Image (cartoon, helix red, strand yellow):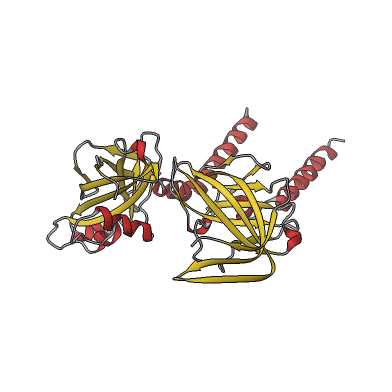
Amino acid sequence: MRQLGWIALTVLCLALTVLLVVWPDLRELRRGKVWTVTAIDAASADLAGVTVSVDAARAMVLPGSPDRAVLYLRMGLAGQPETLRSWLACDIGLSDGRGRIWRPLTNVAGLEIIAALGDEGDTTNNCDQSRIMAPEDGSPSMSVQAFLVPSDLLDELRLRITGFAVRPEALSLPVRPVLRPPL
Amino acid sequence: MIRIAPLLTAAAAAVLLAGMMLTNPDYNSAVRPFETRVPPGETGQTRLIGGRIEGWRTADRISFPAFGSLRQRDTQAMFLIVDLKLFGTTDSTMLRAGWIGASGRRYDTTARISGAFLQIQDLWLQPGLESKAIAIFELPEDEIAGGALMLSDRIDAPLDGRLRLAAPVDAPSHVDHLELDG
């Protein structure tokens, strides 16, 4: 009986040691991914003190490749500048019901999509630039993004947004793009 | 006999411990990406990347348009051009390709053909969309046969997936001069 006690104590110490060692990794894993997505059906919602809004979304099916579409998204982030800066970085993408994520294009093609589907005088800021350069009065700071997505998912896609320091929480808003005829 | 048993137990424990310490992998080995090996001509898939080799060619010289003029690149080795069909799976991914030569050496895609269309290092793979791409390498001729193409996320993140596509069984077609679109 006494030996069993020692064995139990050893196992307990081992478990505690393992927990102590993996604890920082578990915290890093929790922060490194989106685990909890709050889905809202309105065009704007709050996340960690910041109001996120989808201002405009337009899509165009590519004439030569009808299976794919380009999507333009203008969104706003409103909140206190310190709160926006505390996000550290934007983590945004379009998601579908299967959990797949399409990230904004940050290449020349992305700029061309924004030029083709955006408005005259649009901002050229991306999410992170709008976050860092937010107005002091707390009014929305706009940004534009371009995506390449499967055309059959246009009605299904939602904006998933969070910040590096806000994860594992994230917000999901409907995009509802207006379809534009091919240029 | 009673005294020998604990000694043997301690010795066995010491041997086991030494064995564990000697075979304990270093950090980089322990967290290296998982490799998915794909036989010639077949399609493979990892968490982020799916695809197959559609064909392969070699050339001594490549020309391509860039910035409004025709560029030409010669090599003292051989250009290997691998034609690929790829598809994204779960998340938009920028890719990195390498050729594992017959000797085991790894060659990165050449940067000397910058500007030609469809190069894999310029491709942004999107979930649910198929894309054609080419990977161009500059390497010794004896590294081509028996080699394999390694595809990974550009960051090649720890504990993620790599796709190792075996070279086609047939020998690559050869042209002296290959013209690519820009």
Relative to B116, say whether A162 is above or below.
Answer: above
Q: Residue at x 40, y 34 (%)?
A: A98
Horizontal side of A172 relative to B27 (left or right) equals left
Quarter of the rendering occupied by the N terminus of chain B: top right
The residue at the far right in this view is: B1
Count of numbered badges drawn on the protein: 0
The residue at the far top in this view is: A1
Q: Residue at x 20, y 52 (%)?
A: A76
Camera-side residue of B110 and A17 = B110
Q: Position of residue A179 (x, y in %)?
A: 25, 42
Q: Position of residue B83 (x, y in %)?
A: 59, 51
Q: Position of residue A116 (x, y in %)?
A: 27, 55
Find residue B169 and report its image quarter: top right
Horizontal side of A86 relative to A18 (left or right) equals left
Res. B32 in view: no
Q: Residue at x 69, y 54 (%)?
A: B173
Camera-side residue of A92 and B9 = A92
Horizontal side of A97 relative to B102 (left or right) equals left
Horizontal side of B18 relative to A136 (left or right) equals right
Q: Position of residue A49 (x, y in %)?
A: 21, 50
Relative to B67, say whether A151 is above or below.
Answer: above
Camera-side residue of B182 and A77 = B182
Res. A160 in view: yes
Q: Residue at x 74, y 51 (%)?
A: B146
Find residue B135 and report its image quarter: bottom right
